[in-house]
Image: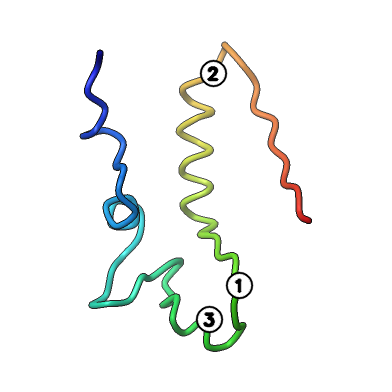
Amino acid sequence: MTDTSKRYPSHGYDLAKANFKIDGADLVIGGMKVRAIVEKTGTPAYIYDAGLMRRTYRALAFALDGFAHIHYSVKAN
């Protein structure tokens, strides 16, 4: 069995730290503190970092090049 714990963070803090900036007690997504976003919009809030989504898509597209196509959809309830 392969140990994936170093490649795939299992803890939320580690995952956030790997992909977003942490400023003191604040998580920063897309250059904005989540606290500030929530104060303006209220909760629940769905916050996406378009830059992170693009980088992740490009990495996946590169890995699948010549093998498969990517089809993506979002379902909102």
Bin the neighbour count of mark 1 within 10 Å (Cα to Cα): few under 14, some 14-19, many 20 and up: few
Return the residue at label 2.
Answer: 65
Q: Residue at (27%, 52%) from the top-left corner?
A: 14
> Looking at the picture, does residue 74 appear above or below residue 42?
above
Q: Are marks 2 and 3 in contact (CB under 8 Å)?
A: no
The three-letter amino acid code for the residue at tag 1 is Pro
| Residue 33 image offset from top left, x and y in percent | 41, 77
Return the residue at label 3.
Answer: 38
Q: Residue furthest toward the right? A: 77
Q: Are marks 3 and 1 in contact (CB under 8 Å)?
A: no
Q: Are marks 1 and 2 in contact (CB under 8 Å)?
A: no
Q: Nearer the viewer, mark 2 or mark 3?
A: 3
Q: Residue at (26%, 33%) from the top-left corner?
A: 7
Q: CA distance from mark 1 to mark 2?
A: 37 Å
* Mark sitting earlier along the chain (2/3): 3
| Residue 70 image offset from top left, x and y in percent | 64, 27
Dot 3: what SS?
helix
Q: Nearer the viewer, mark 1 or mark 2?
A: 1
**Quadrant of the image for the C terminus?**
bottom right
Query: On the picture, is 21 further left or further right than 35?
Result: left
What colouring method underlies this structural image? Answer: rainbow
Return the residue at label 1.
Answer: 44
Q: Residue at (53%, 81%) from the top-left corner?
A: 38
| Residue 49 image offset from top left, x and y in percent | 51, 59
The three-letter amino acid code for the residue at tag 3 is Val
